[in-house]
Amino acid sequence: MSEEIHTLLETHDNTFLYQLLDRMRQDCAYYLSFGGRHNKYLWAGNPDAQILYMKAIWTHFKEGEKPEWLTMEDIEGFETKMKEDLKDASISG
């Protein structure tokens, strides 16, 4: 997957990457609420890949270019909530 991420980062400009990151942020919020935690609502197809891509895109931006509307702490918050959900599902399933 790291080659896919590298290709994504190298073949798209920052405008596209900002838009993708925002879409992924919205996907996470929907996944955790009205989306019923269904992977089909995540751009990357599953929580682990989604977070991996989001972190890679976010860190790809240089200082001063990083989005003000999404911090690494926000991404890690999504990661924690999504992992809690996966853990809860495996216990009850």
Image (cartoon, helix red, strand yellow):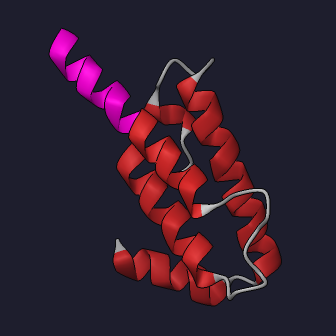
- Position of residue 70 in the picture relative to residue 6 (left or right): right
Q: In terms of depth relative to the viewer, which is nearer, 15 or 68? A: 68
Quadrant in which residue 8 is drawn: bottom right
**In this image, 16 relative to 8: left or right?**
right
The reply to whether the magenta stretch includes residue 42 is: no
Q: Residue at x 24, y 27 (%)?
A: 87
Residue 22 in sight = yes
* Residue 85 is covered by the magenta coloring: yes
Name which residue lies at 56% across and 62% down: 72
Give the vertical position of 42 relative to 64 (above or below): above
Q: Is residue 13 above or below residue 70?
A: below
In depth, the one of 82 and 74 nearer the eye is: 74
Q: Is residue 44 visible?
A: no
Question: Quick one: quadrant of the N terminus?
Answer: bottom left
Q: Left or right: 50 with respect to 25? A: left
Measured along the vertical axis of the image, is residue 41 above or below residue 43? Answer: above
Q: Range of the magenta residues?
A: 82-93
**Where is residue 39 shown, x and y percent of the image?**
45, 34
**Whole-percent x, y for residue 76 in the image:** 48, 52
At a point 47% along the width and 76% down the height, the residue shown is 5
Question: Which part of the image, by quadrant, shows the C terminus?
Answer: top left
x and y, in percent, of residue 30 in the image: 64, 29
Residue depicted at x 54% and y 41% = 42
What secondary structure predominates along the stretch shown in magenta? helix
Specify the farthest residue to the front: 73
The location of residue 26, given as percent across then percent down, is 69, 41
